[in-house]
Amino acid sequence: MDFNLSDMQRMLLDSAERLVGNRYTLEHRRALRDQHDGFDADAWASFAELGWLALAVPEDKGGLGGSIEDVAVLMTAIGSRLVVDPLVSNAVIAPAILSHAPEGDLLSDIASGQRRVALAHDEPGERYGQGPRITRLVRHGNGFTLTGQKMLVLDAVSADMLIVSASVEGEDGTAVVLVDAKDQAIVSEIYPLIDGAQAADIRFEGVSVTPQAIIASPENGSVVLADALDRAKIALMAQAVGSMEATLAICAAYLKERKQFGQPIGKFQALQHIMADMFVAAHQARSALYLALGWATAAPAQRMRAVSHAAIIVGEASQFVSRNGVQLHGGYGVTDEYEVSHHYRRLLTLEKSYGDIDFHIRRIASLESE
Amino acid sequence: MDFNLSDMQRMLLDSAERLVGNRYTLEHRRALRDQHDGFDADAWASFAELGWLALAVPEDKGGLGGSIEDVAVLMTAIGSRLVVDPLVSNAVIAPAILSHAPEGDLLSDIASGQRRVALAHDEPGERYGQGPRITRLVRHGNGFTLTGQKMLVLDAVSADMLIVSASVEGEDGTAVVLVDAKDQAIVSEIYPLIDGAQAADIRFEGVSVTPQAIIASPENGSVVLADALDRAKIALMAQAVGSMEATLAICAAYLKERKQFGQPIGKFQALQHIMADMFVAAHQARSALYLALGWATAAPAQRMRAVSHAAIIVGEASQFVSRNGVQLHGGYGVTDEYEVSHHYRRLLTLEKSYGDIDFHIRRIASLESE
Amino acid sequence: MDLQLGKELDDFRQMVRAAVAEDLPADMRARQRAFGGLQSENLDSLTWAAILARRGWSVPQWPVEYGGKDWTPLQKFVFEDELSSAWAPDVNWGGTHMVGPVIYTFGTQAQKDRFLPDIREGKCFWAQGFSEPGNGSDLANLRTGAVLQGDRYIVNGQKIWTSGAHDAAWGFFLVRTDSTVKAQRGISFLLIDLKSPGITIRQIPEINGEADLCEIFLDNVEVPAENLVGEPGMGWTYAKFLLDHERTTSSFIYWNKRELRRTRAIAEMQALDGMPLAQLPQFQSRLIKLEAEVAALEWSVLRVLAGEDFAYNLTAVASTLKVSGSRLQQAITELQVDLNGALSMRRFPIELAHQRAAPLWPDNIAGRTATALGMRAATIFGGTLQIQRGIIAKLAFGL
Amino acid sequence: MDLQLGKELDDFRQMVRAAVAEDLPADMRARQRAFGGLQSENLDSLTWAAILARRGWSVPQWPVEYGGKDWTPLQKFVFEDELSSAWAPDVNWGGTHMVGPVIYTFGTQAQKDRFLPDIREGKCFWAQGFSEPGNGSDLANLRTGAVLQGDRYIVNGQKIWTSGAHDAAWGFFLVRTDSTVKAQRGISFLLIDLKSPGITIRQIPEINGEADLCEIFLDNVEVPAENLVGEPGMGWTYAKFLLDHERTTSSFIYWNKRELRRTRAIAEMQALDGMPLAQLPQFQSRLIKLEAEVAALEWSVLRVLAGEDFAYNLTAVASTLKVSGSRLQQAITELQVDLNGALSMRRFPIELAHQRAAPLWPDNIAGRTATALGMRAATIFGGTLQIQRGIIAKLAFGL
């Protein structure tokens, strides 16, 4: 067992910290947020250049064949500077799902930064994808027609192609298909999220789907999706760990600098003890991330239990650390002008994406009762 | 609306504080605990003399006709010195149930301190009396035969008579009957509780019951019992409030007296803030007690909701205050030789008697879904 | 002891409820319902005060001679409770509850005549200029200075966290008029026309997309000496007077009750596999415990209003109301966010918040997250949670 | 990074498991299962050490030359985990983990020869004499004095919180041998035969009915000078050495894992209206969250054992393990008590605790409340929760 970074992981982390440290300043992020599509094309080119988009792509698909641990190392740096660019969709979910597809062009294009995808999975009236109920593939000639409605599709605004989960007329299970995001029969409503990213509600009004566009059949679609979603959750947990550790550093610095009653507020024991409890929570969260990574490639039930346990710990730690981070900043903590409120909002969306605490408690309960 | 004590209540409180303050020292309580039946006959005579045992007995039954608020005032003093004598069974439950009985001799004997009762209601395998499932009355000649098993009968050790809930052969509902605690067909196992009191498991092996001994018929037994149990819970909540407020005083004194690192530990901000949070919890608990008192005589659904809301607040506050009270005392807090650990244990049993937090949450949930 | 609210108060409640149902405009109610508790609708506060003033109800807490009502504290409680339940807008607190009482208690007749009617009739929005960038919890350490030159003060300095200053006509300020005496002693209470030359107001963008909190920069602002309230150097005393004036306010009991009802509505309305969220393990206990806590807090408030003789210092009791109330404001809105799950991630611009987002989106999503984000301030403003704990430790226990 | 425990460790685990199944006496297991974590079975610790010694496993953490095993830290982790899972008794910590390492690191050859074999073979119970009535968290401020007279120290003073002193043959003490230098500097590490004249031991009755913690009164106790370990005045350094020796111990990870499994068993076994408590709203989330926390804590321990290069000070990390571990010890036993509901009120005398109370009483009641009561000490002994927070604030953040 070894928790220390390999040389490759150290290089990856250093280059990531350098890039996002220099580029993703508070000012830059606030400017990006107010921009039309919130997409930073220059940064994306750098991500491709640094190999981040090829990291999780298998070597036999032309990628770097990196492990989920490698991805997590990168994601902690991403999280420390609150980068909301569509990395999880393209560097984590895309390789996990598209590696199962026979045709590899799209994955190479994603790896080189030329095309992007988004996963359209959750539907209205759900609490995290229990399987498509509205979105369906109906047979039509040699192929299919896709109709239905997806909600809260993350990273849709910059996606060229959509990965869509759907039921198939007359079959059990969930299929996964690929459609062109610009298809005439697709209607999207794009809106901002509280963390500066955007999402979309997407309606499919009879999109033509060829048999080749089916990347997972109803028999194995659920398994492929569950694996991809757990990898996405791990990536977000790594971002959360990065964000929490950054919050600790920001708060410690603030406590030394801010003076009240004639001394730095960090001299007050009550605030010291809050910082200590934040440290304990963040430390446990990083351990929980390792727990999830340790079981990430195990059998599904073991993997799901570990990921869900980790999601509970990371989610609760995120709340504890970010709430207290704001509290320690006093009034400045609730402004848009200090970093800490941005960590607060991002940590909230990280908890709520790919299964919130409640979802993961319920998932464990159902695993235990099986 | 008036939260201040009436002159009568002030006198009641003063005399109670004087009696229990002088008599129920830590040493006295530890001695009583180690004594065979744990019953303080001299004190009981004083309770009768001071009218505490007649307080809740209706005037038309020869009592003082005091209100539930009066009882609560008395009980805060009782709780502040951790008196575990069978006051709730005899001064609260007995009047609530026996007032419904046609024959009033027993109630007068209780009020004068000559006889005592205990309520045998909960049964094995339950989480707080959902109605008797094991204990049954079977017709036998003109009367009945009582068989069954009760558990955790509080105050049984000093009781002359038992008030027993039972189902009746061929009828719906729950009857309440009175039996002689010394009946040959009764087998009791007596054991100590963590707070110094005792309880018993009681088996009825065919006790003969005359029709006159039925004090509530199956039609109204549940209503009578529910009302009596809510009154008992209110009395215990008042004791808990008294115990918490005593804990606050004990801790504040300890923080001023105990020195570490060259100063009283009460100078440490972290400990000050713990005391402040304990104060907030205890204050809310007293408010919750008033909430329960305010609705104590309302329609059952309103009363039950209020009592259960209060039980949640008082229960959680009891845990918070007693846990932190021990913590503030350091090692001394976990010895039997300091008051604070006795408050801890008593506050735990007060929470667990007549419905714990979980029970009261479930009761509210079922009230809401009606 | 008498622990019943009683029939008279119930009749009074019905009377208020009927009046509010008649008076409250639907659009105002809709805005408040979407963003209740945030301060985005400053102008609604004034309009609503003007409507209430028609019944003489805009400042019931004032003495009758200034347009108040001789209601009992419990009647005022019921009145506020009903307004809040009906989604009436918040009042302009700075005017009706802060500067108003200071003026009618310590002000000159000319000040009373000039300012009180406008406050009462909702004609003028008031902002509070107490905090400064360097003195959050340590209020007495303020630096904004006012120097008397002839018949006017020349004011220089900077204030922060003044809610609604951009919508305000007037501000009441704590300024240092004497720097030769100990901190609290040299502070005076000054009324300043916010249109005065030398004043710059900057709205601070907030965590939830609002920008109601402002910074006010004062650069050689000339203020007539007659705008000083009471005695020079007594500003700290007046500020404490008004902070002590309404001990139960910081419980936000009306707001907590109303938002908790909304929380239960969300939990009953939204379902998972046909089961209302109110019955799911993760949510059921949280919801019921919060209901118990708010019920207890309401009784804590009633105890103060009904004049209980507390065994502890009353300021310590007021701090417990603030601690409990502010934590509940956070806990309730946190639960709303958790009930809304992933949907809570969406940012609804304020101008859309009182519309229903889209047919796909359930009611009671828009505005919830923004409110929850804004509520992080509940344990910061008006004395942080830590400051309140310090007050309690000192005043209740002498620590 | 390599985050797998791997097959070798798994094989090692199976080997240990089989050995323990063979060696552990049933009655010892039953006693430990009833009161696991409390220290009522001091003599079982010795018997069990003697049994383990037959395999050379009684002090695996010691250097091989003194009878330890050259197992890796992760093997030792698995070993402890298996012993705990099988309900093996706790070891006599004072001997095997405290005085033993001090003796083999700083002691003379004569001390090593005299004491180490007895510790290894479970022949002698050791008690720790550090704390005094006046110096709970402020350990350096100790007063028990030892004055050298010829070839012996005359010791006078009082110690408190010495676990198992009534069952102990020897004690290791921190005593002040020089009161002319600064607090920490004048302290020495002294081994004292508890049968020496002048020693009085009083068992302190505890919150849970036990009386394992003792006071030791030392009245002109004569101790041969050869019983001083290492250099005079270095006692504080040795005490810190042994407290730092096992950074992961204070997590009580094995105990927490085992008691949490028991907690789930209670929750699955006991039912309400046919529904296991594990599925009731109030309990389900609590149980699953605790399982998640213990899983995370286990990985926190593995990080230390596998030698992670921490970004933060290692002592701060050790304090986080103590904070998390002690809170979990409390939270887990609190949940056990709540699952047992009203039944948890009963006091089971220790001598009955390993019997099943009566046919009416479900398994897993006796001993649970006593354990929960005893666990209030988890956040007090070995540095209170508040002391740990102070360490973290200082060492992790320089506050």
Image (tube, coloured by chain):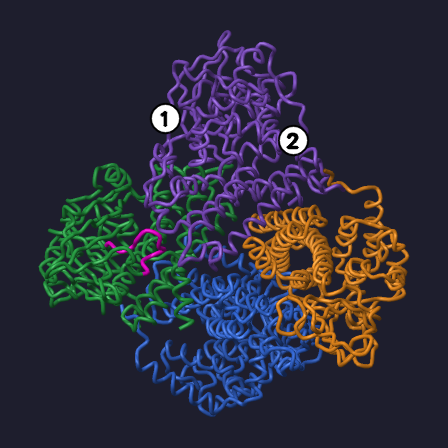
Chain colours: A orange, B green, C blue, D purple
Q: Residue at x 90, y 54 (%)?
A: A62
**In the drawing, what numbered circle is on residue A295?**
none
Q: Quadrant of residue A121?
A: bottom right
Instruction: Mark 1: give few (<14), some (14-19) or many (20+) Cα within 10 Å.
Output: some
Relative image position of residue C146 (x, y in whole percent) = 63, 70
Subunit ID for the residue under disc 1? D
Q: Is residue D49 above or below residue C292?
A: above
Whether residue C42 appears in this view of the structure is: yes
Relative image position of residue A273 (x, y in whole percent) = 57, 48
Q: Residue at x 58, y 73 (%)?
A: C128
Whether residue C159 appears in this view of the structure is: no
Q: Nearer the viewer, residue B109 or B274?
A: B109
Sooner in the amino-acid sequence: mark 1 or mark 2: 2
Horizontal side, residue B130 vs residue D320: left or right: left
Instruction: Mark 2: give few (<14), some (14-19) or many (20+) Cα within 10 Å.
Output: few
Relative image position of residue C106 (x, y in whole percent) = 47, 76
> Identity of the amino acid at label 1?
Arg
Give the Cα distance between marks 1 and 2: 43 Å
Quarter of the image containing the N terminus of chain C? Answer: bottom left
- Residue beneath disc 1: D202
Q: Residue at x 54, y 52 (%)?
A: D288
Horizontal side, residue C9 vs residue A337: left or right: left
Q: Tell me, yes or no, whether the highlighted magenta stretch contains residue A167.
A: no
| Range shown magenta | B120-130
Is circle 1 on the same chain as circle 2? yes
Q: Quadrant of residue D220?
A: top left
